[in-house]
Image (cartoon, grey):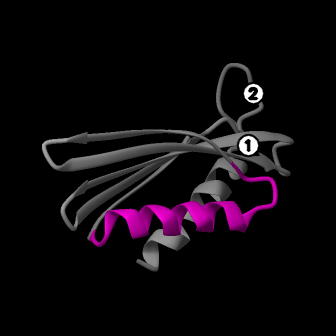
């Protein structure tokens, strides 16, 4: 498992669209699985799950991306999972890190 978090200012809808398009265009095997969208007292929260094939691990890796917005104050959190091949402990998590690097690079351009 790998995690990335960032707080910044921006437009919620434009940021969500930018991240979505960037994640899907970065890998031919990337797919958008599902989302949950909640708005409560003006605070917006969107949780999205993406998957892609990891050539190094020979399996699929998932990434959960959460974007929370209160006006222009945004918080991004992403967690990857699923790249390990071991039964009792995690090993070979390169696929998880590589998938998270895709989001990290996009987020650092914001």
Quadrant in which the N terminus is drawn: top right
Depth check, front residue: 30 or 58: 30
Crowding at mark 1 (Cα within 10 Å: few <14, some 14-19, many 20+) = few
On screen, residue 62 above or below 87: below
Give how far across and how far down residue 9 sits, in percent: 25, 72
In the image, the segment drawn in magenta is 9-31
Q: Residue at x 26, y 56 (%)?
A: 69
Q: Is residue 96 left or right of residue 68?
A: right
User: Residue at the bottom extreme?
Assistant: 109
Query: Which quadrant of the figure has residue 23?
Result: bottom right
Q: Residue at x 27, y 49 (%)?
A: 44
Give how far across and how far down residue 39 sits, in percent: 26, 42
Crowding at mark 2 (Cα within 10 Å: few <14, some 14-19, many 20+) = few
Query: Which quadrant of the figure has residue 47?
Result: top left
Give how far across and how far down residue 98 sits, in percent: 67, 58
Q: Going from the N terminus, do you reach mark 2 or mark 1 first? A: 2
- Number of marks present in the image shown: 2
Determine whether label 2 and label 1 are within 8 Å by CB: yes
Q: Which residue is mark 1?
A: 92
Q: In the rendering, which numbered label is found on residue 36?
A: none
Prevalent SS, magenta region: helix
Depth check, front residue: 68 or 79: 68
Q: Is residue 97 left or right of residue 44?
A: right
What element does badge 1 sit on? Answer: loop
Q: Residue at x 77, y 32 (%)?
A: 85
Magenta stretch holds residue 19: yes
On screen, residue 20 above or below 88: below
* Real-space CA distance between mark 2 and mark 1, rounded to the nearest whole angstrom: 8 Å
User: Residue at the left extreme?
Assistant: 41
What element does badge 2 sit on? Answer: loop
Q: Residue at x 71, y 35 (%)?
A: 84
Q: Which residue is mark 2?
A: 86
């Amino acid at each position: 498992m790998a995690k990335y978090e960032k707080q910044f200012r921006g437009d919620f809808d434009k940021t969500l669209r930018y991240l979505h398009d960037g994640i899907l265009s970065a890998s031919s095997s990337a797919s958008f699985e599902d989302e949950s969208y909640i708005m409560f007292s003006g605070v917006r929260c969107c949780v999205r799950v993406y998957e892609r094939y990891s050539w190094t691990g020979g399996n699929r890796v998932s990434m959960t991306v959460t974007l929370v917005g209160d006006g222009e104050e945004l918080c991004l959190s992403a967690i990857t999972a699923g790249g390990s091949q071991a039964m009792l402990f995690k090993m070979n998590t390169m696929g998880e890190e590589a998938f998270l690097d895709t989001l990290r690079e996009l987020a650092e351009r914001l």
